[in-house]
């Protein structure tokens, strides 16, 4: 599955994406807040906080149908790839890109897989915390993928996206969502500054994303 | 009833068309870029068009359409209310029950006209059982605040709102089969009063009614709005079982309650540090921003009609 080739959406993928966006609107009334960037056809990496399985549905519901057809969420291969049904849902319905965090073979290198998607002109949705945040902390420390991708493809815009309230809609261990209003705040693009260290960049990107939270005073 | 409905619809269309024309003329004459007040005015009028069309469509589907429309309004209002309050993971099942059980059951009670349970289901059974479920979950953090907010959320967004379609279940002698007109009367008078208060406030507003709660409400707006809305009520008495004088009095009470509803909603928003309840309607904020007055007026209007006009 290494150098996967991406086609335009199949009928199933289009139907799934329209259906899920409609569902996201019914449950959460999701609305984008463009606060520093604007909708665009440009190639982008959207990076967001991650608290629930619904996060990427909410984020892609904020994109136009045209952008959605070339934007892929990056998901954990060891979970979504470990049964035929899950792989079918992740790849054939949601058109996600699966990466293995415990990779061994060179063709499983997550960075290479993500770069191959970017090189076909497509965009990515990335959750740089690496896993769903189940802690009381608002945002976990970032892994290095964001930095590596930006260094390799500096022309791709990195857009921070704060997803509001999803942890309340679908808390840990729950299956049924509670209808609550959600917004996705899209911030100004972040780029690695000349000579900027990995650590420093990741901390800056982390702080930029956290600063987009429209209601940081909430403790729930 | 057809005749009265046609007059109401033509009247509404005439008012909205006039409003749109006035807004277009003001916008054309005003210096560019347009002031936020003018942009907001145009957005509000456009949203009114959508709302009037929606309510008219529901009207043509009769009682069923009205009941479903208000169940959906309850859903949107409850979603906004719960979003603003403090919730914890342990509240998940109570919250799901509010949307999945309380809303459908309350509107089923409206639909089957089961008055005895309709008036006590939320204030008695939900009032006692919701905090019991929360306590059974064993999470006592900010307990009273959480159960109080849940109680308020269902009382306001479900119980109070459901009194609008419940008007269809009232049996007013000599008015059989025309109860939809009671809903039209209530909505037009209360929402009309909101608009009239806004206009009188913008034109003559000087003395603030309650600067701490809502800086935009003025004594001039309140008095002008209430008097003119009562006159509007008297004018519309031909669609109601009321005489013109009675219609004016009922409209006055309903609109006064509506004013208080707006005031309470403003106080809650201020307490929670937000300007609007949500973002459902362009230029109006959320559903609760549009229905706060109707929410307070509906139960009182319902019981006035039930006490004085039904058998």
Image (tube, rainbow, N blue to C red):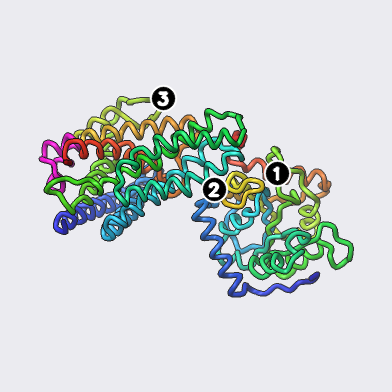
Quarter of the view holding residue A211: top right
Which labelled disc corresponds to residue A178?
A: 2
Determine whether A81 is above or below B95 in the image: below
Q: Residue at x 28, y 53 (%)?
A: B20
Is A57 colored magenta in this rendering? no
> Residue under mark 2: which chain is it in?
A
Dot 1 corresponds to which residue?
Answer: A134
Q: Are marks 2 and 1 on the same chain?
A: yes
Return the x and y of residue A176 as percentages of the image width and height. 57, 52
Residue A38 or residue A126, whichever sits in front:
A126
Name the residue that disc number 3 marks.
B212
Question: In the shown orientation, is residue B76 left or right of residue B139?
Answer: left
Can residue B34 be seen by looking at this rendering? no
Label 3 crowd bin: few (<14), some (14–19), many (20+), radius 10 Å: few
Q: Quadrant of the N terminus of chain B?
A: bottom left
Q: Are marks 3 and 1 in contact (CB under 8 Å)?
A: no
Query: Where's the C terminus of chain B, which quadrant?
Result: top left
Q: CA distance from mark 3 to mark 2?
A: 33 Å
Q: Position of residue B167 (x, y in %)?
A: 26, 45
Highlighted range, magenta? B230-251
Q: Chain of mark 3?
A: B
- Residue located 69% across and 53% down the image: A47
What's the CA distance linking mark 2 and mark 1? Answer: 18 Å
Dot 3 falls on a residue whose secondary structure is: loop
């Amino acid at each position: 599955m290494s150098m996967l080739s991406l086609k335009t959406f199949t009928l199933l993928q289009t139907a799934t994406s329209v259906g899920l966006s409609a569902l996201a609107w019914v449950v959460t009334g999701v609305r984008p807040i463009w606060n520093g960037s604007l909708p665009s056809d440009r190639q982008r990496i959207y990076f967001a906080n991650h608290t629930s399985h619904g996060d990427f549905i909410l984020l892609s519901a904020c994109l136009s149908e045209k952008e959605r057809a070339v934007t892929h969420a990056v998901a954990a291969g060891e979970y979504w790839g470990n049964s035929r049904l899950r792989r079918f849902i992740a790849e054939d319905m949601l058109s996600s890109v699966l990466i293995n965090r415990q990779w061994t073979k060179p063709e499983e290198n997550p960075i290479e897989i993500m770069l191959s998607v970017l090189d076909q002109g497509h965009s990515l949705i990335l959750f740089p915390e690496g896993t769903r945040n189940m802690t009381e902390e608002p945002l976990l420390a970032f892994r290095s993928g964001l930095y590596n991708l930006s260094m390799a493809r500096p022309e791709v815009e990195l857009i921070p996206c704060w997803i509001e309230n999803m942890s309340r809609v679908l808390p840990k261990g729950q299956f049924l969502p509670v209808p609550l209003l959600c917004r996705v705040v899209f911030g100004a693009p972040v780029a690695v500054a000349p000579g900027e260290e990995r650590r420093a960049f990741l901390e800056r990107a982390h702080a930029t994303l956290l600063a987009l939270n429209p209601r940081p005073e909430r403790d729930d | 009833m057809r005749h009265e409905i046609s007059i109401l619809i033509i009247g509404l269309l005439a008012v909205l068309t006039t409003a749109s024309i006035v807004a277009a003329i003001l916008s054309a004459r005003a210096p560019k870029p347009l002031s936020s007040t003018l942009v907001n005015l145009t957005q509000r009028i456009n949203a009114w068009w959508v709302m009037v069309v929606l309510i008219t469509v529901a009207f043509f589907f009769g009682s069923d359409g009205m009941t479903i429309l208000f169940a959906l309004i309850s859903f949107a209002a409850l979603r906004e209310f719960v979003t603003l309050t403090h919730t914890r993971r342990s509240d998940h099942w109570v919250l799901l029950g509010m949307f999945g059980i309380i809303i459908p059951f309350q509107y089923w009670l409206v639909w089957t006209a089961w008055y005895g349970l309709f008036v006590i289901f939320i204030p008695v059974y939900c009032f006692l059982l919701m905090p019991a479920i929360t306590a059974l979950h064993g999470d006592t953090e900010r307990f009273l605040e959480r159960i109080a907010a849940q109680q308020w959320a269902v009382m306001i967004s479900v119980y109070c709102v459901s009194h609008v379609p419940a008007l269809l279940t009232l049996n007013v002698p000599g008015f059989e089969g025309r109860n939809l007109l009671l809903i039209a009367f209530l909505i037009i008078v209360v929402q009309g009063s909101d608009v009239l208060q806004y206009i009188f406030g913008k034109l003559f507003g000087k003395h603030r009614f309650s600067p701490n709660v809502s800086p935009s409400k003025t004594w001039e707006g309140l008095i002008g709005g209430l008097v003119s809305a009562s006159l509007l009520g008297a004018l519309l008495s031909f669609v109601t079982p009321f005489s013109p004088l009675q219609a004016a009095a009922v409209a006055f009470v309903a609109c006064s309650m509506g004013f208080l509803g707006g005031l309470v909603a403003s106080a809650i928003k201020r307490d929670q540090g937000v300007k609007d309840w949500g973002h459902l309607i362009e230029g109006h904020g959320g559903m609760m921003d549009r229905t706060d007055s109707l929410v307070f007026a509906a139960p009182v209007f319902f019981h006035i009609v039930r006490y004085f006009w039904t058998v």
